[in-house]
Image: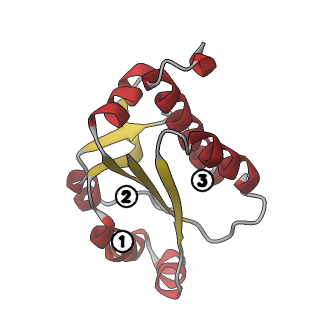
Amino acid sequence: MEILVYSIQKSLTDSFESEIKQYIKMSSKYAKITDNVIFNDKIAKAQSVSEAMSHRAYEDVYEPKFKGFCVVLDERGKDLNSFEFAKILRENSQISFFIGGAYGFSEKLRQKGDIVVSLSKLTMAHKIAKLMLFEQIFRGLCINANHPYHK
């Protein structure tokens, strides 16, 4: 199983990187997980101009990466419990997760995903959402392997 996580993120400083690396390491016996951080000058400029320009910049970097079963993370997405999340992992051999930038996702990118999932209806810092995603990936893999972590 291959899991790809894509995020638009300006800086890795103080972004729970050590905790995320730990979840990737713990998950490695179940899946190959790659954390792909994307940020470029076009995104930086677009985010300083408008939401519409930001959405276009996000589309430009994300659309070529839509491979396998694609999960778009958005606060307006579907609420799943951990067992429903684990089912997505169990039923797909390649999964790509997409975390939006400062302005979230355009409707075009939301529709391009196979499913749109909400980690919470609350708005949270990008780095916290990303940490939650990696924890849920590990939890879902453990559920599927009957590992006691979930209990």
Outermost residue to the top: 151
Which residue is denoted by mark 2 in the rendering?
105
Three-letter amino acid code at disc 3?
Answer: His
Which residue is denoted by mark 3 in the rendering?
126
> Horizontally, is 11 left or right of 85 in the view?
right
Residue shown at 50% from the left, 33% from the top? 120
Three-letter amino acid code at disc 2?
Answer: Phe
Counting from the top left corner in percent of width and height, residue 39 is at 54, 76
**Separation of disc 1 and disc 3 at Cα?**
19 Å
Q: How is the image coloured?
A: secondary structure
- Pointer 3: residues within 10 angstroms few (<14), some, or many (20+)? some
Residue shown at 40% from the left, 29% from the top? 85
Eye-nearest disc, 1 or 2: 2
Which residue is denoted by mark 1 in the rendering?
52
Instruction: Let me know if residue 94 appears in the view.
Output: yes
- Pointer 2: residues within 10 angstroms few (<14), some, or many (20+)? many
Residue shown at 49% from the left, 39% from the top? 30
Q: Nearer the viewer, residue 2 or 126?
A: 2
Three-letter amino acid code at disc 1?
Answer: Ala
Eye-nearest disc, 1 or 3: 3
Q: Secondary structure at mark 1?
A: helix
**Separation of disc 2 and disc 3 at Cα?**
13 Å
- Pointer 1: residues within 10 angstroms few (<14), some, or many (20+)? some
